[in-house]
């Protein structure tokens, strides 16, 4: 129940984190390594749950704690509550996982009117002794007695005014003595209880308070949010006090063994002379950079460097340290794995490989894949003062500042002139595409993380905040208002897509930086992974970008985006409005050369790699105009009346377009459409092949629910491919497969795999149908679901393994039963999400596909999944 | 390959239907029973496929046929092609399943210039002989040579005119001889081939023609439509001719052993003196009722009665007979199971049980459940001349005539005045409900078989034709046009929901008749079935009707329909438009007493039985007004502006409402709503229980995707139920369960069943989400899918067992693993569909639930499913 450490050896080790908590395990390990740590002991976290459930301590605990105190007394040659050389202790909570929001630290426990006098006598510094007593009552009163901290501060402030001083440290002992009494009175007044003088009494109440802090609302909410089990409990660390505030040869500080921001290989941190640790953290005085310590206390600094080296070598990772120097002697109070930026993580991992500290596998395994986002996108300079306007969904990472524009055409105009613009829309539709191309970032009031705005922004690598529900765009589209503030067109705002935050004004950014370390690390990753990584790309530019990021093919080329560009939309509308198949064919004939040249460009960009092309998917009414002026223009172009256009638009409108006439249903009702698209694909493929390019088209039939739908569309594809091969006198090998995006397709995968050569899981639509959840409409309640813990995550962001994943696993298994060499991939938005990548690896898929900027993340995640399977890595270590 | 029958014994039996076809098996069985049948033989259907695949007959067939001819010659003491007592034969096709659209019959085969003379001599009736020859060439020319029948008819007509006679039978032999030559010339002119004189040659070409008829377009289409395998093939029946046209002591006729229309126990049929069978069928002469035969040919009539009795006893079912009387002697040419109306089927089954002919199990097993619809709903008098306007989906069975009304309010007004009205709408919404109540039938231009109109109409037992896409309702709602015709408001039309047909004008109807036989049969059914049968009912009236039809509880009470009645909609809208929870509670407080009294009425109506109540399910915007005048009225009532109402309506509109804020999501976002509903349920239950009524509420939480949603809503239900029990000082036992209508719920049924006490499969929504198919929008392509064979049936009409059914089976299994006594039912529109009922039995569900008029059908289907499992019944027999 109680683990002692001190005098050069500890009963615990670093491996006992579950029992001792992170802090306790670190202290034990340091002692075992011979590093100077004040002696003390840890009460195991298992006691915490026992205490909370039964309301009492188990028998023997009291005796074990007493024995540990005695050993601490022996190690320090001090006496707890003694009137000579009194032993003071600190009490700190510490669970296995770091949990801010738990109980804070209590220092100087053991002081009372008798021991404070002894401390004054021993140190020869009554000011130090009384200040320590004052601090103790203040902390203890707050933590154990729940007295509001402000009440202590107010009294302290009044006392300083009365004494005519401004700094705490300048209060003379007499004033501090009065202050101690005033603090005790405050506790009595607030709680009706006397402040305990007996050190043992002080200690037990502190231990109880630590355990009870496990169940505060704050702590429970935090655990819920981070999926930490309530049964974990917290340990209690009790350690002999050392004093950084014993004069000018004393100090307290924090240090990182390397720079956690840049990864530079040198001690990084700060310290304060004549201070306790809390002073460094609280910001009441300005600490000095750690380098200065080399001059202030050269001995202690060298010792700190030595400790840092030892700990890094031992733990094989960067450490985050707390230390105190008491009268020139260094004591370590904490060591733990250091948090770091994405940049630093990559550099440190590479450096440590070079230093022989870790293997390439470990380097790859320990970088959280999402940290790469910081390297791939601009980030806000953390030194900025920010003026938060509102928060929406973190739809596409990165940050950008620009002037607010509400209209895609205007965004394009201004963008061409070189202005930085942010496109702000209630929601975006394919008609806004050119405006999004011109914008630095996109902000929408509606829509989720898989809305049009989000998907397109991610594809382009632009920051996007979607579904910022507090924003109301004015009807005249000349301003938006949020929480009483109004932001006009032309005003500067900053969109931080990584966090979902929107700030007023222009903000300084740190540009992305992809350097040698990045490529080295991903090179190692590539050598470990099994899964292929492809890019979702609709244009040659997208394809090039994806290839630059390491994509090995295109997993999803959405042909519909091609129909919005320039005057193609007119031909598309003619096709839709045609009265019969002949009219449709005429309009399609205009689209054919455009599609063909798109495909040529894409095949060239992806030469040597497979390109999966999805046939037309969205409902046709998405291509029709909605606003009156556009309808009038179209009517003129089509030589008909606006009323006629209205009539057709109304006739084609659907109540649930997501579940309507789209996907292969379109191709079945209007076989001319796939016929044109397939011809464009194969004519382009033959042209590239003629010039010696290796082309591998994979034609994908969307939204199949029944194998007969696939069979019917497959017939069209095969017939036209044969025709084109004969016309062009060349044959291009190709695959014919389907997107699995409806539960029925997954449930009948065995039947479908008999016909289809590959499956690509469209997890966006599969999530929509499996959950019965429209991604366009779920913004009205899904955020609330996540907030209240009804869902641990938005299933459009994090793959729902127990529902959607179950269908996927079934489909992969039964599909491969029908066709052993079935090629299987995923091309939904989850394709670049690390947990989903691991899931795909577990299903033995062939590849994942995602937007270009997610490709490096997927490469890393795929390597980690492969390593995890090999058991080379400690997964928890990499992801905590 | 060849099966002879004659001289009192046959090589085949009734059990050899697959090999001999229905006709051949019937003939063989009759011979074995000692019934007079002309001798002959059957060429097995397996030869048909061999011939069609290889293009030739197998060796030995020719010899076997020759031997069979010889045996027929011996049995008749005639010679095939003989110049004395020539043997003539008929050739008829006959597959195992009846297939109209196959080859017709050829009679009198074997006639040529020599044998016709012999026949004339033998019969002493040259007119008969030449008329027989003329008929033979005409039939053979049509069937074997494909000469258009009209060409023969034109020549016959010309010959009659030339001879100055009007009836065929009055043509003298000389004229008939000329006619024979003219017919032969026609064949030669049309085909370039001479008409064969050699009887053997005639026979083989006829056999080939029968086999080839198996592959005509017509036959293949028919098989596709009826799911008959192409591999079945047809047999050929060759039988010695007997002549009903040998003078006044000869006759031909058809007879049923009982009346197939009423079920009355007496011979029913008609005959013609001096005629061949084809004359009775063709309608060229008017036949006489079979009773007249008792006077015309009393001996033969008594013999026919004896044969009928023998066959009925032997086959234990009503037979459909063909017979010929040759010079006073009766010959049977066919016996088969008789088609019959629903009325007749029920009466016959009951009578046969009383006669000891069949068991109660067999009576139950042999009635096709859907035949009950004829008994439950008015049908169109088949003697009517009908003027078909258009055809839509058969959405709710029955037929009704009435005047066209386009507006629900007007329908209500006129209905109250006693006018018969048909409500015609582009589609219906809950706002049309009162108009539907007042209408005799409903006709919509859009929407499928599970559209609002269809569901509500079925619930009320009113005829409905939905999705009649040819209908265009005029913009002024004063007429509709269809295929160039215009039907104005106030004009009479007739809607036949059983077939989906719409007729112009008023039509005479046969009223439904539920008598003692019906109740007796269903009583037997109830004693066999395992599945409970409940009704989907939203009002006390629905509940009473369902109970009258034998429902044992309510499987689905949709609470939302209650909110549209009278001024409730106003309170509902106030609730929706309220700014906060308090405002919502105030409006809900107005609704509480209304809901409570609804539930009281329903509990009383279903006293002693369970009542499953689904909490509010549809998106709230369905309750908001859409048209300008209504919005203005609401704005006045709410003391706000129409603009404000518009703003709210727009804000609440959803892109895919089917996948939006509905079901339990509503209850989670607005917990006040379930709180009010649950209070109403339990207050009502307590009130009824206080008065001694046995109440069994089952509270159903809709649209659960994740178990945590259920848990959260279940908490509300349990807390409020406890409150009410304490207030009312009584406890009512209740169950708490969920509707399984999303794939994710089915996939995680094990988790959900740990919390839910029952599952009710909502197969409408489950089909929508599993297929990704909106039932509101699928009308644009689903009919085409079925037409082209991409789907064998609309999955909203026929449960998709291989997709949706797979999910259901998984969910039942995994749900019961978590909770052994999990109660499982189905409450979608499939609940009353016989195949789905059998599926539910196979899954060991506890009950099915359907609209009131489907309850008897479900009871019968459930009994049949149970019997099928016991192996008591021949399923094919019951359903063919």
Image (spheres, coloured by chain):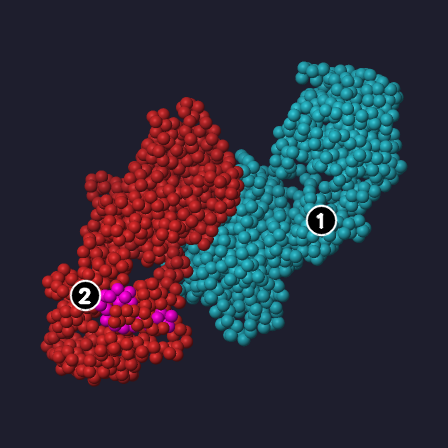
Chain colours: A red, B cyan
Q: Is residue B826 visible?
A: yes
For the image, the number of numbered tags is: 2
Residue shown at the point (43%, 37%) measured from the top left: A700
Range shown magenta = A28-48
| Residue B522, quarter of picture | bottom right
Image quadrant occupied by the C terminus of chain B: top right
How packed is label 2: few (under 14 Cα within 10 Å), some, or many (20 or more)? many
The percent coordinates of residue A749 (x first, y second) are: 50, 43
Q: Is residue B63 above or below residue A816?
A: above
| Residue B497, quarter of picture | top right
Q: Is residue B217 above or below residue A650?
A: above
Residue shown at the point (26%, 64%) measured from the top left: A33
Depth order, front residue of B485/B727:
B727
Depth order, front residue of A341/B301:
A341
Q: Secondary structure at mark 1?
A: loop
| Residue A308, quarter of picture | bottom left
Q: Secondary structure at mark 2?
A: strand
The percent coordinates of residue A127 (x first, y second) are: 14, 78
Q: Read off the residue under disc 1.
A: B873
Residue shown at the point (70%, 29%) measured from the top left: B47
Q: Read off the residue under disc 2.
A: A253
Q: Is residue A270 left or right of residue A66?
A: left
Mark 2 vs mark 1: give the one in front.
2
Letter of the chain that mark 1 sits on in the rendering: B
The percent coordinates of residue B802 (x first, y second) are: 56, 46
């Amino acid at each position: 129940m109680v683990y002692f450490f001190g005098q050069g050896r500890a009963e615990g080790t670093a491996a006992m984190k579950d029992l001792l908590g992170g802090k306790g395990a670190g202290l034990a390990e340091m002692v075992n390594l011979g590093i100077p740590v004040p002696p003390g002991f840890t009460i195991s976290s298992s006691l915490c749950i026992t205490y909370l459930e039964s309301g009492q301590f188990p028998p023997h605990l009291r005796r074990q704690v007493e024995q540990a105190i005695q050993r601490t007394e022996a190690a320090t040659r001090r006496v707890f509550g003694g009137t000579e050389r009194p032993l003071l202790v600190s009490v700190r909570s510490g669970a296995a996982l770091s949990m801010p929001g738990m109980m804070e630290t209590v220092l100087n426990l053991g002081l009372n009117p008798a021991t404070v006098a002894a401390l004054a006598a021993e140190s020869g510094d009554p000011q130090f002794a009384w200040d320590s007593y004052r601090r103790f009552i203040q902390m203890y009163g707050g933590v154990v007695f729940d007295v509001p901290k402000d009440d202590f501060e107010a009294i302290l402030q009044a006392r300083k005014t009365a004494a005519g001083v401004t700094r705490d440290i300048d209060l003379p002992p007499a004033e501090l003595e009065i202050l101690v009494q005033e603090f005790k009175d405050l506790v009595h007044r607030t709680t009706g209880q006397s402040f305990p003088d007996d050190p043992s009494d002080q200690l037990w109440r502190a231990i109880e308070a630590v355990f009870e802090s496990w169940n505060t609302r704050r702590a429970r909410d935090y655990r819920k949010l981070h999926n930490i089990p309530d049964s974990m409990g917290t340990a209690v660390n009790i350690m002999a006090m050392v004093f950084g505030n014993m004069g000018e040869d004393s100090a307290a500080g924090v240090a990182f063994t390397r720079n956690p921001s840049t990864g530079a290989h040198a001690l990084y941190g700060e310290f304060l002379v004549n201070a306790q640790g809390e002073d460094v953290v609280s910001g009441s005085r300005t600490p000095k950079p750690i380098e200065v310590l080399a001059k202030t206390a050269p001995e202690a600094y060298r010792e700190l460097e030595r400790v840092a080296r030892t700990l890094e070598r031992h733990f094989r990772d960067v450490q985050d340290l707390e230390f105190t120097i008491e009268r020139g002697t260094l004591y370590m109070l904490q060591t733990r794995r250091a948090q770091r930026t994405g940049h630093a993580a990559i550099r440190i991992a590479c450096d440590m490989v070079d230093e022989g500290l870790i293997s390439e596998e470990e380097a790859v395994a320990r970088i959280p894949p999402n940290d790469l986002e910081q390297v791939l996108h601009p980030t806000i300079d953390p030194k900025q003062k920010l003026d938060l306007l509102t928060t929406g969904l973190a739809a596409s990472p990165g940050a950008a500042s620009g002037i607010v524009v509400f209209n895609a055409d205007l965004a394009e105009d201004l963008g061409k002139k070189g202005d930085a613009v942010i496109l702000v829309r209630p929601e975006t539709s394919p008609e806004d595409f050119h405006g999004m191309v011109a914008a630095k970032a996109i902000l929408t009031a509606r829509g989720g993380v898989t809305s049009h705005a989000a998907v397109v922004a991610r594809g382009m690598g632009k920051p996007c905040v979607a579904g910022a529900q507090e924003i109301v765009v004015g009807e005249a589209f000349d301003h938006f208002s949020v929480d009483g503030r109004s932001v006009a067109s032309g005003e500067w705002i900053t969109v931080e897509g990584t966090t979902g935050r929107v700030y007023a004004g222009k903000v300084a950014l740190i540009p992305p930086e992809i350097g040698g370390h990045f490529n080295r690390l991903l090179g190692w990753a590539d050598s470990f992974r099994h899964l292929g990584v492809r890019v979702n790309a609709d244009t040659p530019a997208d394809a090039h970008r994806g290839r630059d990021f390491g994509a090995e093919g295109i997993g999803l080329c959405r042909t519909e985006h091609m129909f919005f560009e320039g005057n193609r939309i007119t031909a598309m509308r003619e096709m839709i409005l045609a009265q019969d198949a002949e009219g449709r064919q005429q309009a399609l004939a205009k689209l054919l050369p455009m599609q063909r040249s798109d495909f040529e460009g894409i095949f060239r960009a992806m030469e040597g790699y497979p390109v999966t092309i999805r046939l037309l998917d969205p409902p046709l009414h998405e291509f029709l105009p909605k606003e009156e002026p556009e309808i009038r223009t179209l009517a003129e172009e089509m030589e008909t009346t606006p009323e006629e256009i209205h009539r057709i638009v109304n006739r084609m409108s659907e109540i649930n377009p997501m579940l309507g006439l789209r996907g292969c249903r379109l191709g079945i009702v209007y076989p001319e459409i796939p016929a044109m698209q397939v011809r464009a694909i194969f004519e382009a493929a033959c042209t590239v092949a003629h010039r010696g390019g290796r082309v591998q088209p994979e034609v994908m039939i969307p939204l199949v629910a029944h194998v007969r739908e696939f069979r019917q569309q497959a017939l069209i594809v095969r017939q036209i491919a044969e025709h084109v091969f004969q016309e062009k006198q060349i044959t291009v090998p190709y695959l014919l497969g389907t997107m699995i995006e409806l539960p029925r397709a997954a449930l009948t995968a065995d039947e479908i795999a008999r016909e289809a050569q590959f499956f690509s899981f469209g997890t966006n639509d599969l999530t929509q149908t499996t959950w019965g959840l429209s991604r366009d409409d779920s913004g009205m309640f899904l955020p609330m679901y996540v907030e209240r813990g009804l869902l641990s995550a938005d299933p459009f962001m994090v793959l729902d393994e127990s529902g959607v994943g179950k269908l996927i696993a079934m489909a992969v298994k039964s599909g491969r039963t029908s066709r052993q060499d079935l090629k299987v991939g995923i091309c939904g938005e989850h394709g670049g999400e690390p947990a989903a990548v691991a899931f795909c690896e577990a299903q033995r898929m062939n590849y994942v596909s995602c937007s270009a900027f997610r490709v490096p993340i997927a490469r890393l995640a795929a390597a980690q999944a492969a390593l995890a399977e090999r058991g080379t890595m400690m997964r928890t270590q990499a992801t905590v």
